[in-house]
Amino acid sequence: MENTKVKKIPLRKCLGCMESFPKKELVRVVRTPEGDVCIDLTGKKSGRGAYICKSEACLKKAIKSKRIQNNLEVTLSDELAEALAKEISGENR
């Protein structure tokens, strides 16, 4: 019997469509311990994270239903909402 380990893929739930996806396929928004809210492209910043899949419809739904704000326990600024929209639409690449 071979002793190969199967690597577990971490799943996270999108706040727009509420479906689970591999963590790497989602965009992470993080509230740092200092209280700043930013987009975490590395997925490694410390703080409370919220995930959204790379779909504009999911982003709009998550913002409209205030799921991001409730999950991170902060108010979402217009600048951050615009930055998220650009990141998801691929304009930052």
Image: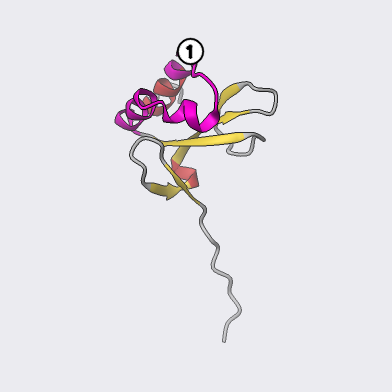
Residue 7 coordinates in the image, percent (x, y): 55, 63
Comparing 18 with 59, the one in front is 18
Q: Residue furthest right?
A: 34
| Left or right placement of residue 37 versus residue 63 in this view | right
Residue drawn at point x = 45 percent, y = 26 percent: 93
Task: Between residue 40 and residue 63, name the one nearer to us.
Answer: 63
Q: Residue at x 29, y 29 (%)?
A: 57
| Residue 44: x %, y % from top left | 63, 39
| Residue ID at (58%, 74%) | 4
Whether residue 20 is in magenta: the answer is no
Residue 75 image position (x, y, % from top left): 51, 19
Colouring chosen for the image of the structure: secondary structure
Residue 65: which quarter of the image?
top left
What residue sits 36% from the left and 46% below the top?
Answer: 19
Q: Position of residue 23 (x, y in %)?
A: 49, 46
* Nearest to the observer: residue 32 or residue 23: 32
- Which image quadrant for residue 41? top right
Residue topped by disc 1:
79
Question: Which residues, given as a range, are shown in magenta?
Answer: 55-82
